[in-house]
Image (spheres, rainbow, N blue to C red):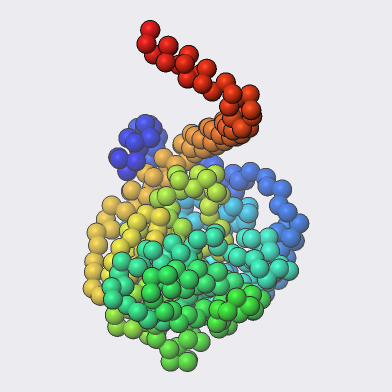
Amino acid sequence: MKTLIDSTFIRLIGQEALAWNHRLLNADGIEEVDFVQNRKIALENFRSEIQKNNIRLKENEKCQCGSVDFEKISSCDRFGMLFPTWICKSCGLISTSPVIDQQSSDLYYRKFYHPIHFDLNFSSHKTALYAQGQGEKIFRFVHPLLEDVKQLKILEVGMGTGSVLLEFKNAAFQSGIDVNELGTELNQECIRAAEKNGIAGLYGSFNEVIRQNMQFDLVILSHVFEHFVDLPAELEKLTKILKPSGLVYVEVPGVMSLHKKSEYDFDYLMYVTHAHNYHFNLTSLTQIFNLSGFELVRGNEEVETVFRKGFQRIDISKNYEQLKTYLVFLEQNRFYFSALKRGLNDMKSQLKAQEIQLQHLNTRIRKMESTWSWKITSPLRSINFRKLINR
């Protein structure tokens, strides 16, 4: 934390920094957002299904570490829905409570998740749910750990429309690695979209893969792990489908990287969503995997990580205070980061305008140099230039 704060020349103000900001705890703290029509309808229908008890909610009464000592961070999510988040004072893991229970998850992801978060109804099967380059980025991250590997059997859980697997496969091919890929998904339209791009899809999650008795060299959980309800149960399933020397790539939104995330307006409230049951930094994610028999191979605060089966225990005693200090720091300085982002964008626009002017000037010069008058007067310009040098 000290390095981060010093590097941005921003100082936390004494004991005032130790109290959560009232805006985060106020259910009306989120600004009114004019949602597009598809999203607005989906949110209204989602609320209605909760009221009818067709989508059931459950409280997280105990942290994954076993503690029941929580502190409330926020009261609502980015959509203004009352899904508070809490931080465990023992290990620092942030969780949403209440959450959508396991039995209601299929209905939620089939009908509501995509239109709420992406404003999509899949009228176009060309839609990619992840930023272009995500699959290639994942390959670059794991490639140093794949020495002498020529064939790779990989599974992506929650593949969306398959764009990550397709990019990963193409990048691996360029490095001489033949990939045999499979993706699971809880949305049939996503599976159809993936299959149109040649990516094999399977409806379901870990259970269906286990039933088919498959094991993999690499399992990808890209922005999926934070959606799970019962983390130990899911990690037990992961153990069954991973080969003994297999790797797991796990990427989740890193709570301690929000000062870099302009897509969330550098704002914790714009980041949290009811679909994320847990919110990790590198330490809290590593702790969860350690408890289920995995060790961290590499990782960062983004959080982009690789795990493998093994024994590891890390120190989590300071994680609560580190996260709390960071989130207060973020809340106090989110306007600074927004202003900095606007300033950088203005500078980019100005540089782009200057680049265009230079291009126009170069075009005019090239046209002038191609004229007869320029060519005829060239010797005179050379004489005048030599006289100027000899003065």
Q: Position of residue 166 (x, y in %)?
A: 52, 72
Q: Quadrant of the N terminus?
A: top left
Corner quadrant of residue 61:
bottom left
Residue 347, image x, y percentages: 53, 32
* Residue 22 visible: yes
> Relative to 386, is 38 on the left or the right?
right
In the displayed orientation, state which residue is furthest to the top.
391
Q: Residue at point 49% right, 75% down?
A: 157
When the figure is inspected, residue 337 is found, relative to residue 106, above or below; the finding is above
Q: Position of residue 357 (x, y in %)?
A: 60, 30
Judge from the rendering whether residue 78 lies leftward or rightward of residue 148; answer left or right.
right
> Can you tell which quarter of the image residue 356 is in?
top right
Name the residue located 52 percent from the left edge and 78 percent from the top edge.
183
Q: State the residue in front, 88 or 381.
A: 381
Measuring 32% from the left and 53% from the top, which residue is drawn there? 319
Residue 66 image position (x, y, % from top left): 35, 68
- In this orientation, which residue lies closer to the viewer: 261 or 155? 155
Task: Judge whether 73 appears above or below 215 on screen.
Answer: above
Above or below residue 118? Residue 166 is below
Quadrant in which the C terminus appears: top left
